[in-house]
Amino acid sequence: MKLEIKDLHAGIEKKDIIKGVNLTVKEGEAHVIMGPNGSGKTTLAKAVFGYPGIKVSKGDILADGRSILPLKTDARAQLGLFLGFQHPVEIEGVGFVNFLRASREAVSQGQTSMKELMKDIKLLSSGLKMDDSIIGRALNKGLSGGEKKKAEILQMALQKPKIAILDEPDSGLDIDAVKIVASNINKVVEETRMGLLVITHYNRILSYMHPEHVHVMMDGRIVADGGNELIDRIEKEGYESFGR
Amino acid sequence: MIDQKRFVDDALREYSKLPGELEQLYTRRSVPLSIEIKQESLPDKKKEGVAVELHNELHAKTGVSFDATVWEGGWFTCGSPAMKLVKFGEDEYGELLSNSQHKSSEDKYVALIHATSRQALKIDVKDSTAAELKVLFACSDDPLPVQIHISVGDGSKLTLFEWHASQGHKDTFSGMLRDIRLGKNASCEINVLHNEGQNTTVLEHTKSRGDDRSSVKVNYVYAGSGTARARNLFEASGYESKVKVEEIIVGSKKQKFDLNTYVVNAAENSEASLGSAALAMQECACYLKGFAKITNGARGARSFVGEKGLLVDNTARINSIPSMSIGENAVKATHSSATGPIDHDSMFYLTSRGINAETAKQLMIFGFFSEPISSIKSGLAKEVASSIITAKIKAGGELIGIPELKAENTIWESATEPGIAHHYKYREEREANA
């Protein structure tokens, strides 16, 4: 899959937060968008998934050359896109396993064996060093910030998307958890050759992931593209050096 | 011996003079009813055919075997020594009336049922035994007023499943006075499914008292009927006795639910709780009026009233009015109330995983009912309740006569590893028994 964001302008009501973003992510590529708070990173991720509160005023988002703007959120996911949430929503009463089954069936368009699903969940949760009790919980209910992030990675691994956008997968994680999450993301990338777009403030997780493409986002625009040298520059000089 | 004719005349007189509501707190928040006394004599034998037909259809579609089917003119297929039908005019009927916890003067519709009921279902579990009973209450064009007297003796246990259905085409009512008494260390779970047709008005009255260390759990599921009105009183009257009531309401198509349930802590270290979960759509109106009372002297009592509502569209309304009256200091008492529409961020989260909007909405609705459904201990009652809710939601709010009991209908409420294992064990046992 090739995901192309072309001259995208999007925002809430009449105010554009994204002001002309161009970005292309292909399967097998690892990208990272870095930027300060309020630069529009999360809005961009939500716009790709058709969040109802965000309106695209100009530009287009294409998957393999076809616009996905007319598609609803579920249809975008069914194409092979995945969004790892910055703040995963807690949903009362919806069993985690039941949700995963519905999700897997929706994406694969077929029936899921509960036995197989449980086997996969146990394997993945063990790899992520997650407590088994998550299986018996309601979706994200009562999980710590770190556990929620791990649960997002578990969902991504089960869904095997073509391109995943991970919105701050490292926020709320301690240093050991960052390593675990990063290694599990790497594992899914190796297994599936999916494309990856990581959104983050900090370089902490990137020292375990080594993305080839780094983009810096400021005030709704991508102001710099490059490689790891941009990460070093942000580390040394902060975002101000990009014209904040 | 009670003069039954005089009792009925008194009840009729009370019915004609009493206002719809006696309780001032809730007078302005009630559903007005227009019930007429139509049953002056027992229905003819032909009406039994309707009950038989309903019973057979239910059995064929669900595989459920009822121990008894109670209809307007009597009952049939009773196979349990713990249960008997007592007819109006018999001495025992008079005794039941005179000992009833329900008094004609307390409520207009209690008087109506006293005046019109001609039979009482008596369930008596004693000598530390256990009974599991399933009863179908079948109502046709005639009203079905019935008295249900339940006595669970010291150390005994009862699991009762009541399925209330109707097949009439005329406006009618299904009214019941349920009188529950529990002895020391007795326990019972009563599951009441109201799945009557749109023409039927349900009048539900339950009163319950329990002796020391007794435990009563009553689960109501309101899915059918045009209007349902409940006035219930559950009293944890013995030391360390427990009362737990769950009300599950799935409302659509202009259905009206007016549920006023009191849970009372009347003894030391007693526990009493009421949980109401109402889903409303398509101009449905719900009044949830839970009231918890802790009497003076009930030290160490624990009490909880929780009411929650989910509005699926903007044509429905839910009035949730939890109240408490606390007459003792050393107690724990809490109440909660929350009603709102389906959360947009939750919808976005679910659909971002490829789940379509309709399925996402259903998942959230099932999630909303997950807690009260999971608390039902009886496998059959849990399966039927889940299936009714699933079928009604999937049918876009249409009233479901008889749901198909399927594994996929019920798995949602127990989607945890132990829950799944328990669910399949129950299914296997049921299939083996069939």
Image (cartoon, rainbow, N blue to C red):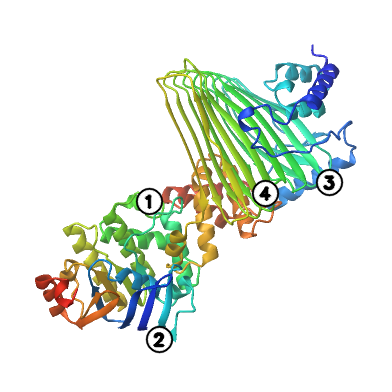
Identify whether A200 is placed above or below B389: below
User: What SS does tag 2 mark?
Assistant: loop
- Residue tagged 2: A64
Would residue A167 be found to the left or right of residue A103 on screen? Answer: left
Q: Of the residues tagged 4 and 1, which is closer to the observer?
A: 1
**Which residue is pictured at 44% across the width and 84% down the height?**
A67
Q: Chain of mark 3?
A: B
Q: CA distance from mark 3 to mark 4?
A: 29 Å
User: What SS does tag 3 mark?
Assistant: loop
**Which residue is pictured at 81% across the width and 37% down the height?**
B143
Q: Nearer the viewer, residue B422 or B17?
A: B17
Pointers 2 and 3 in contact (CB under 8 A)?
A: no
State whether discs 1 and 2 lie on one chain. Answer: yes
Measuring from the top left, give residue B257's x and y in whole percent.
65, 42
Would residue B387 be found to the left or right of residue B324 on screen? Answer: right
State whether discs 3 and 4 lie on one chain. Answer: yes
Residue type at mark 2? Asp
Q: CA distance from mark 4 to mark 1?
A: 37 Å
Q: Chain of mark 1?
A: A
State whether discs 4 and 2 lie on one chain. Answer: no
Q: CA distance from mark 4 to mark 2?
A: 52 Å
Query: Sequence order check: which comes first, mark 3 or mark 4?
Result: 4
Q: Chain of mark 4?
A: B
Would residue A1 be found to the left or right of residue B159 on screen? Answer: left
Q: Nearer the viewer, residue B350 or B381?
A: B350
Measuring from the top left, give residue B290's x and y in whole percent.
56, 34
Q: Give the farthest residue toward the top.
A: B1
